């Protein structure tokens, strides 16, 4: 296929680099006060974000030149490694942060196996669904085997526990399965089973139930479960059309806990206003459009499904994150791709973008 290789999708590269640039700047702005108080270094989080961004861009360009078809032979080993990491993180080797044992690593540097599992399972499902495409309309022989793997992965992630990552993984893979040709009646049937299962997961953990109540009426729980939502709305409101100005957020003065992570968009909107927030969302829409275009024009089914899976992963995370920040969804702890602080999330997202760019090099 070497002679068929073209230039990668330039719009994807430019859009991602713009989002990364915005992310590093806003991570610094959002975290400067917290960094100074906690580490006596206002650049603590920004320096690490920049380091991960550089590593991620290197990985993106490497994968952009790595023939995505070679991933087929690695699909099973990648899937097995993902499950192994999801099991290992539940052992004493796992690191607990914010009530969830979801990390492997030392100190502030570590990886989140659930992040790796999202990309790894996209690769495996793209390979599996291409191989068994003629059976995907059958429930028992086509749909049930991959769904069993998905349920197992979600079960392991829920043991951490991490309902947010489980939701992103489930949404991404279901979009992938639908794109591969699964019957709508089967997917609707699964949804009817998933809703009671989701309700049960909420009911067995009191803090999740409290988050639902706080979502419905945050001011009733303003000192606990509703605190983050209220502070996020206090940031979004004063931002107005033009914002308070870069670096002039009020909520970052320790009103909003960990403002550099999953609630970073409200700091961005407070400082850059509706215009700044809308510009970032337009960049995401541009990225998603190009991702779908790559999927449509891919030369083979594996590449098409791989592109759809990566694009869906980004779309689901953006929708959930913006939904939480604007008070339209209960708090889940999902980061905003390329913008929020987080090493393993950024590295894996950029690896996925690299694969997407490589597929674009062979598009029709």
Image (spheres, rainbow, N blue to C red):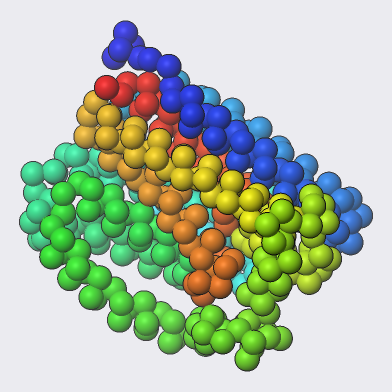
Side of 254 where 194 appears, left or right: left
Residue 146 position, x and y percent, is 23, 55
| Residue 1 sits in quarter | top left
* Rendered residue at 34%/32% (across/down): 294
Which quadrant does the C terminus fall into?
Answer: top left
| Residue 144 sits in quarter | bottom left
Check the image and name the residue furthest to the top.
3
* Rendered residue at 68%/49% (across/down): 109
Side of 270 where 316 appears, left or right: left
Residue 78 position, x and y percent, is 38, 42
Camera-side residue of 307 and 12: 12
Check the image and name the residue furthest to the right.
40
On screen, residue 308 above or below 299? below
Residue 10 position, x and y percent, is 48, 24
Side of 51 where 328 appears, left or right: left
* Rendered residue at 59%/66% (across/down): 325
On screen, residue 80 above or below 102? above
């Amino acid at each position: 296929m070497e002679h068929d290789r073209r230039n990668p999708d330039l719009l994807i590269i430019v859009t991602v680099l713009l989002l990364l640039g915005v992310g590093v700047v806003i991570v610094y702005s959002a975290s400067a006060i917290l960094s100074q108080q906690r580490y006596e270094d206002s650049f603590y989080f920004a320096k690490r974000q920049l380091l991960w961004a550089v590593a991620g861009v290197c990985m993106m360009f490497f994968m952009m030149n790595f023939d995505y078809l070679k991933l087929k032979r690695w699909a099973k080993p990648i899937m097995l490694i993902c499950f192994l990491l999801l099991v290992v993180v539940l052992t004493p080797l796992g690191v607990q942060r914010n009530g969830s044992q979801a990390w492997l690593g030392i100190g502030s540097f570590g990886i989140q196996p659930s992040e790796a599992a999202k990309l790894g399972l996209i690769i495996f499902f793209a390979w599996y669904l291409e191989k068994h495409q003629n059976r995907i309309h059958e429930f028992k022989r086509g749909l049930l085997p991959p769904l069993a793997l998905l349920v197992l992965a979600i079960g392991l992630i829920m043991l951490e526990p991490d309902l947010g990552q489980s939701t992103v993984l489930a949404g991404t893979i279901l979009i992938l399965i639908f794109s591969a040709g699964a019957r709508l009646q089967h997917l609707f049937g699964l949804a009817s089973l998933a809703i009671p299962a989701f309700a049960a997961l909420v009911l067995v953990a009191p803090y999740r139930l409290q988050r639902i109540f706080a979502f419905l009426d945050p001011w009733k729980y303003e000192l606990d479960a509703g605190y983050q939502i209220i502070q996020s709305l206090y940031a979004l409101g004063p931002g107005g059309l033009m914002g308070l100005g870069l670096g002039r957020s009020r909520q970052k003065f320790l009103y909003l806990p960990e403002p550099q992570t999953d609630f970073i968009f409200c700091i961005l909107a407070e400082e850059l206003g509706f215009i700044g927030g809308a510009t970032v969302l337009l960049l995401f829409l541009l990225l998603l459009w190009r991702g779908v275009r790559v999927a449509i024009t891919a030369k083979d089914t594996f590449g098409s499904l791989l592109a759809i899976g990566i694009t869906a992963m980004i779309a689901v995370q953006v929708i959930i994150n913006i939904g939480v920040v604007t008070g339209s969804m209960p708090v889940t702890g999902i980061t905003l791709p390329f913008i929020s602080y987080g090493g393993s999330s950024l590295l894996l997202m950029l690896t996925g973008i690299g694969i997407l760019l490589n597929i674009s090099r062979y598009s029709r």
